[in-house]
Image (cartoon, rainbow, N blue to C red):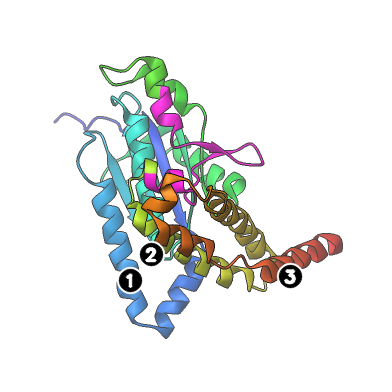
Amino acid sequence: MASAPLPSYERRLILFLDFLGFREIVAEINDDPAALGRLIAGLNAVARIVEDGSVESERVTQFSDSLVVSYRVDETCGVFWLLHAMAMTVVELAGRGYLLRGAVTIGDLLHDDRHVVGPGMVAAYEMESQRAIMPRVIIDPAVLDIAREHRGDLHTPDDEEGYVRSFIAVDDDGEHFFDYVSWRSVVEIVGADDDSYGTYLAEISRLIERGLRHSDTRVLRKYLWLHRHYLAAIDLFEAIPVDHPYRAQSPENCEMIASLPRFDALCAAASASVAAEQQRS
């Protein structure tokens, strides 16, 4: 009887996502049974995004508060489609009141229906836990080389890299990340309805208000980061000239976004708490 072939790693693109504050999400379910339904609805929405069957080598594993999606590195336009799935997932869940932290990288991985293991998984986890830190998904710049090599048939290497870079911003610490707060990312890149962007930012504002009231300075740092990107999104709309065509086209959107709270006092108090903690340490 022939022995089964030994399992082996494949070189794969890897997306690892983790819910921020999952312990508090579970605690909320204890106090509000309807919260479980909202969480499951969010997870089901994510499943529809990442399991659409458009990438043949796609593997998906969801366990507790984590999600792993991987593709073989030689998938045509694989980097683009993985970042697209990531962006759709992050925006979908943020709009439902859930923040994610995660990483996109490349590595050796065994990923099947029952297992997800390998140095690539370790690398993705370490990127998420040690470098992402804030509620953001960071992106290994090495994926750009993979995108150029395994591009669409009608794309030049520069074309493919440009499409991939549309998902990538550079944060203040130099990390490449997906800016899920900006109008460009949410409306232009993900394809959300422009008229819904104000409502989306309002949900982000509710998350920020709750986060800036937290007693743990580690949590405060995360929401101060989010608050900074939130203000940048509001400021972009406030800077639109009075005679700009967009104001005439979407006056309600402009007014709603301009009226969103800026949380100056909460931000100042949170910043003071973080500074005091730094002095003590």
Rendered-image quadrant of the C terminus: bottom right
Q: Earlier in the sequence, mark 1 or mark 2?
A: 1
Quarter location, residue 279:
bottom right
Image depth: mark 1 or mark 2 in front: 2
Q: Is residue 61 visible?
A: yes
Which residue corresponds to the image point at 67% horizontal and 74% vertical from the top-left? 215
Instruction: Give the amino acid at mark 2.
Output: Arg
| Residue 126 screen position, x and y as percent | 55, 44
Which residue corresponds to the image point at 45% horizontal and 78% vertical from the top-left? 28
Spatial CA span between label 3 and label 1: 31 Å
On screen, residue 180 above or below 11: below
Instruction: Give the amino acid at mark 1.
Output: Arg
Image depth: mark 3 or mark 1 in front: 3
Rendered-image quadrant of the N terminus: top left
Residue located beneath label 3 in the image: 269
- Given the current orientation, which residue lies at the most extreme right position? 279
